Amino acid sequence: MSDLENSPKYEGGCMCGRTRFTIFDQPNLATYCHCDDCRTSTGAAVSAFVGFETAHLVWQGEPLKQYRSSPTVLRGFCSECGTSMTYEDEKLPQHIYFYIGVFDDPDSLPMTNHSYVEQKLTWLKINDDLPSNTGTAVPREEE
Ligand SMILES: [Zn+2]
Ligand SMILES: [Zn+2]
């Protein structure tokens, strides 16, 4: 377990604290998502999430409740306080994506691009220099 001592550590949880997690790894993705599904699921004009490999994730407390928002996508939320926490695609079983707001120190995980800009709200103006993707920034399984 000496690897864990030297690895990065990101912690977070839902608003009520029933569900907590720790990740011992660097993220492989940090993107704003402008898609309709994230907007409806989170209630926010734009979401932002961070991707990790599930192998480096440890859950504590109550398991999340999950909602299937499309044929392969499961969105996780706290069954008590309703905090939107995770996005998982069954086509990418080794990966999990956390909404930025659930981390204890979200400032330590800066976004690096924009996804689904074609679905962005027209009144939302992006004035950063980050790359923008049409469609997903999540890596797709090789076809
Ligand atoms: Zn909660
Ligand atoms: Zn989205």
Image: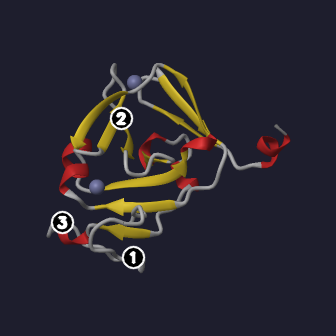
Q: Position of residue 88 (x, y in %)?
A: 38, 44
Q: Position of residue 107 (x, y in %)?
A: 54, 54
Which of the 4 image quadrants contains residue 67? top left
Which of the 4 image quadrants contains residue 108? bottom right
Color theme of the render:
secondary structure
Query: Distance between the Cα atoms at labels 2 and 1?
Result: 29 Å
Mark positioned earlier in the residue sequence (3 or 1) = 3
Q: Provide the residue designation for mark 2.
A: 76
Q: Secondary structure at mark 2?
A: strand
Front disc: 3 or 1: 3
The answer to whether residue 52 is above or below residue 68 is below
Residue at 51% from the left image edge and 42% from the top image edge: 103
Q: Provide the residue designation for mark 1.
A: 128
Kind of residue sitting beneath label 1: Asp
The residue carrying pointer 2 sits among few (fewer than 14), some (14 to 19) or many (20 or more) residues within 10 Å by Cα, namely: many
Query: Relative to 23, is 85 on the left or the right?
Result: left
Q: Position of residue 143 (x, y in %)?
A: 36, 66
Kind of residue sitting beneath label 2: Gly
Ligand number 2: quarter of image: bottom left
Q: Residue furthest front?
A: 143
Query: Relative to 89, is 71 on the left or the right?
Result: left
The answer to whether residue 33 is above or below residue 71 is below
Mark positioned earlier in the residue sequence (3 or 2) = 2
Residue at 42% from the left image edge and 45% from the top image edge: 101
